[in-house]
């Protein structure tokens, strides 16, 4: 099952966006058929898929192919030079960076949006609407023996705890384990994994005692079937939202979302034009994909990073 793309048309935005894009595509992509290939995070997929859809309408002759093999699986392809960019819901690891270096792939990350990694239960779960970080850690740590909700909190009912979450190739898995358990990739293994967030959504929604975690996009698309669990990180219960992610209150589960661009690929005009299009319209694209747009300060950094990337590709 492919990640769901919200149905809409992208609204073209500010004058400075048009100027940025014009500067990027000044050389043109030509009229010949050409490709841009992206793989990686299923969480980031809706954003790049929407950008690809609109870019292709504006740029006949260029096809943008977007895959969803997970952040880690995508980096495997990216560092072998098989893709032009990689969607990522976490930073590149040291091992992945070494693999890129071994294959001569220079790269740069572009932070394109924010996500609030959301802990979800079924809509019928009326007891676990807020959990502390310590409770989440005890549920998910590798040595956990918790199998019922009552073991999480004596006030909760004696209902079996069914766990669902991203597979080990997912950036969400790395981010969640690092933020909640305290060590990346440290997790109990007796849960049902999937690289497709829609599968996790369906499983949790169908399980009275289900618990999982997905990108905020997937919760918003299914908020009639799911409930988002507020997180108490020591300052009271805070629910995930655009506002709490942007102002830093929803911590530590707010994360930046990245597109890692290959510097060699950026020498090709169609790759440069597509990524320039994404940067020029990042706020509209993020909202269309139901992500949290960057703040003004973060957007200024994105434009600066993209400008530096195009300069590196030109040398």
Image (spheres, rainbow, N blue to C red):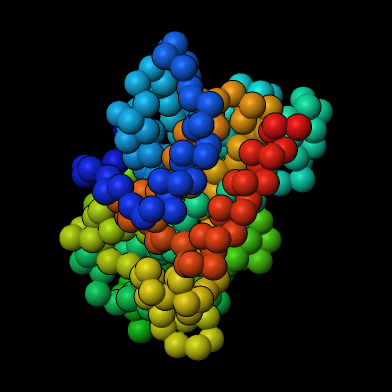
Which quadrant of the structure image shows residue 290? bottom left
Which quadrant of the structure image shows residue 180? bottom right
| Residue 42: percent from left, percent from top | 44, 41
| Residue 120: percent from left, percent from top | 35, 62
Task: Name the foreground residue: 21 vs 148.
Answer: 21
Which quadrant of the structure image shows residue 105? top right
Residue at point 55%, 77% (across, down): 134
Task: Name the foreground residue: 247 vs 283.
Answer: 283
For this orientation, the residue located farthest to the top is: 32
For this orientation, the residue located farthest to the bottom is: 235
| Residue 217: percent from left, percent from top | 34, 54
Location of the N terminus by quadrant is top left
Residue at point 55%, 61% (across, down): 300
Taking the image as shown, residue 92 lies to the left or right of residue 247, namely right
Residue at point 23%, 61% (across, down): 223
Taking the image as shown, residue 223 lies to the left or right of residue 263, namely left
Residue at point 66%, 56% (across, down): 184
Residue 218 to residue 76: above or below: below
- Please tell me how many numbered marks the rendered image carries: 0
Task: Name the foreground residue: 166 vs 145.
Answer: 166
Taking the image as shown, residue 203 lies to the left or right of residue 169, namely left
Residue 164 can be seen in this image: no
Taking the image as shown, residue 66 lies to the left or right of residue 123, namely right
| Residue 12: percent from left, percent from top | 30, 47
For this orientation, the residue located farthest to the left is: 224
Task: Name the foreground residue: 242 vs 181.
Answer: 242
Location of the C terminus by quadrant is top right
Residue 291 to residue 259: above or below: below
Residue 133 can be seen in this image: yes
């Amino acid at each position: 099952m492919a990640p769901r793309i919200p149905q809409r048309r992208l609204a073209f935005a500010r004058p400075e966006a048009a100027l940025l894009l014009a500067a990027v595509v000044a050389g043109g992509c030509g009229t010949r058929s050409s490709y841009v290939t992206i793989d990686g995070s299923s969480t980031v997929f809706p954003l790049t898929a929407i950008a690809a859809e609109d870019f292709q309408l504006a740029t006949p002759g260029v096809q943008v192919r977007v895959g969803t093999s997970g952040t880690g699986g995508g980096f495997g392809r990216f560092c072998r030079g098989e893709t032009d960019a990689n969607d990522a819901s976490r930073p590149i690891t040291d091992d992945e960076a070494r693999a890129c270096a071994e294959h001569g792939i220079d790269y740069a990350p572009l932070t394109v949006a924010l996500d609030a990694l959301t802990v979800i239960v079924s809509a019928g779960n009326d007891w676990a609407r807020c959990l502390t970080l310590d409770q989440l850690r005890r549920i998910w740590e590798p040595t956990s023996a918790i199998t019922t909700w009552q073991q999480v909190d004596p006030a909760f009912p004696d209902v079996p705890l069914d766990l669902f979450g991203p597979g080990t190739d997912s950036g969400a898995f790395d981010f969640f384990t690092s933020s909640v358990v305290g060590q990346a990739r440290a997790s109990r293994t007796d849960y049902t994994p999937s690289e497709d967030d829609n599968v996790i959504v369906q499983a949790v929604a169908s399980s009275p005692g289900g618990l999982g975690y997905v990108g905020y996009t997937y919760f918003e698309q299914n908020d009639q079937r799911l409930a988002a669990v507020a997180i108490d990180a020591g300052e009271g219960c805070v629910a995930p939202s655009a506002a709490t992610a942007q102002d830093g209150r929803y911590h530590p589960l707010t994360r930046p979302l990245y597109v890692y661009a290959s510097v060699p690929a950026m020498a090709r005009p169609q790759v440069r034009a597509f990524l320039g299009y994404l940067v020029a319209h990042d706020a509209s694209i993020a909202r269309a994909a139901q992500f949290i747009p960057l703040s003004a300060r973060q957007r200024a950094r994105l434009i600066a990073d993209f400008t530096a990337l195009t300069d590196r590709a030109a040398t």
